[in-house]
Amino acid sequence: MNLSVLDIFKIGIGPSSSHTMGPMNAARQFVLTLQTQGLLAQTTRLCSQLYGSLALTGRGHCTDQAVLLGLEGAAPDTIDPDLIEPSLARIRSTYKLHLLGSHEIAFNEPKDLQFHYSDSLPGHANGLRFIAFDAAGNELLRDEYYSIGGGFIVRAADHNTGTAVDTSPVVPLPFSNATELLARCRDFGLEMYQLVQRNERSWRSDTETRDALLKIWHTMEACIERGFRAEGLLHGSLALRRRAPRLYRQLQEAGGVSPMHAMDWLNVFAMSVNEENAAGGRVVTAPTNGAAGIVPAVLAYYRRFEPGASDDGIVRFLLVAGAIGMLYKINASISGAEMGCQGEVGVACSMAAGGLVAALNGTNEQIENAAEIGMEHNLGLTCDPVGGLVQIPCIERNAMGAVKALNAARLAIRGDGTHKVSLDQVIATMRQTGLDMKNIYKETSLGGLAVNVIEC
Ligand code: SF4
C-alpha cells in the first residue's frame, strides 16, 4: 500500500491515535458495513469488545468514549471536541445509542461495552470486536479490527494476509526504505521533498498538497495557541495541572536574554500540544497523538527562530517528515502497543529532525543522518503511562523529544552526511527492540512508571 504524507499527518482528536481515533474509526466502519449490507434497520443491540492494550489502558485513553461516538457516526477529523461531553452524557443518561446518528437502539453499558483485560486478539495488541444482534437475539454481523497506530485501522481478516484490496494509487517514485529513497533522489537529481511531492501528485495537485500541508501546520499552530490559554487540571485520576500557560507567561515576561531561550520555547510549544491532546482537544497525528507535540514544536521553533523561515520551508519540512514517518510505518510500526514509546516519541523525533534539516535546505544525506540520530538515542524507550492516561510521562516526553530533534538536526547539518549507522539500520533495530520488549512496557500500564508512581 502506498502512503501519502496526509496519511501520516491527520487532523483528529486526543488523547490517543491508536486508542481513541482508531477505535472511533473502527466503530464507525462497523456500523457503515451494517448499513451497506442492509442490516442496520434490523439491529436492536450492538456489543463492542475491547482487547489487549485497548482494554488495559482504554479508559485512560478514552477508548470507551471513542467507540460510542464512532457507533453514532462520529469521525476524528470532523467531530466538534465541544460536543463530545454532551453526546456522552446523553447516551449514558438515556441508555440509548443512535447508530450513524439516526437508528436508535438500547444501550446497556456493562453488557454492550466490554473490556477484556486478560485476553488479546491474535494479530495485534489493540483489538476490537463488534457484534450486531436483531430483536430475536440472532447475530446479524460480527467483525474484528485492529488499531495499528496513528489512527490507522485494519480488518482482522485482512491483517498480514495479503488479502486486503490495495486501493491506493500507484506512485511514480516508490521507495520502501531509506536507501532506496536516497538512491531515487540521486538518480533523478531531486531534493527529498521534491521526490515526495512528485509522489503526492498521485493523490492531488502540488497546489492542493501545499494547501493541505499548510492547513496541517495551522491546525498545529492553533493547538499550541489553545494550550497557552487553557488553564486548570487535566481530566483523570492524576489531577495534573496544565503547565504550558504559566511557562508561556514566564517566557513572555522574561524576553530573549537567556542562551537557553529557544529551548524554553521548544519545551512550551511541545507541552502545550500534549496538554491539549490529554484534554481531548483538536490535534494532528505526527505520527501519533501521544507524540503529537514534537513536530509542531520543532516547526514553531523554525518559524520563530530561524532567519528566513517561510511557508515553503514548512512545506519542505512536512513532506520530508512525512516520508520518514512512512519508512517507520512500512518497516516497523508506529504503535506504542507494539514498539513501546520508541515507536511514538522516537519516530516523531526522527521525523522532526529530518524535517528541520529539509526546511533549512540541508542535503538529502544530512536529512537521513538527522533522522537516524533522532531515533538512535530513543532506542529502547518504553511506554508506561501512569494511570493509563496520556499525561505522565507523555507530556514532558514530547518536550524532551523536541529538544533532541533540534539537536539531531544541528549535529547532522554541521556534518557532510556521512556516518556509520544508517537510518535503515536504526529502524530495523527499533523494530527488533520493540519485538524483544516485554508487554508490560508496551502501552499496558503494567510496568515502569505506571506501577512505581502512586496515583493520588
Ligand atoms: S509513553 Fe509514549 S507511547 Fe506511551 S502513551 Fe505516552 S507518548 Fe504514547
Image: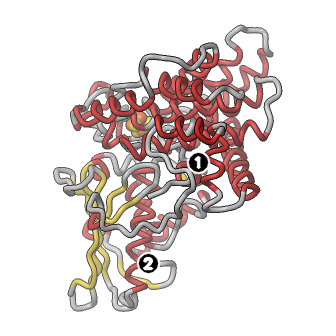
Is 356 located above or below residue 403 in the figure?
A: below
For image coordinates 80% across by 36% down, the residue present is 310
The amino acid type, in three-letter code, at marker 1 is: Val
Query: Could you tell me if residue 72 is visible in this image?
Result: yes
Between 247 and 213, the residue placed more toward the observer is 213
Is 145 located above or below residue 253 in the figure?
A: below
For image coordinates 35% across by 38% down, the residue present is 387
Residue 358: horizontal and vertical position, in percent?
Answer: 66, 32
Helix or strand or loop: what does disc 2 sit on? Answer: helix
The amino acid type, in three-letter code, at marker 2 is: Leu
Q: Residue furthest front?
A: 187
For image coordinates 21% across by 51% down, the residue present is 117
Is 100 located above or below residue 424 in the figure?
A: below
Quarter of the image for the C terminus: give it: top left
* 372 horizontally vs 441: left or right: right
**Residue receiving disc 2:** 32
Q: CA separation, marks 1 and 2?
A: 25 Å
Helix or strand or loop: what does disc 1 sit on? Answer: strand
Residue 242: horizontal and vertical position, in percent?
Answer: 57, 33
Of pointers 1 and 2, the one earlier in the residue sequence: 2
Residue 270: horizontal and vertical position, in percent?
Answer: 60, 31
**Does ligand 1 reach within 8 Å of label 2's beta carbon?**
no
Q: Quadrant of residue 308?
A: top right
Residue 284 marker: 1
Identify the colour scheme used: secondary structure
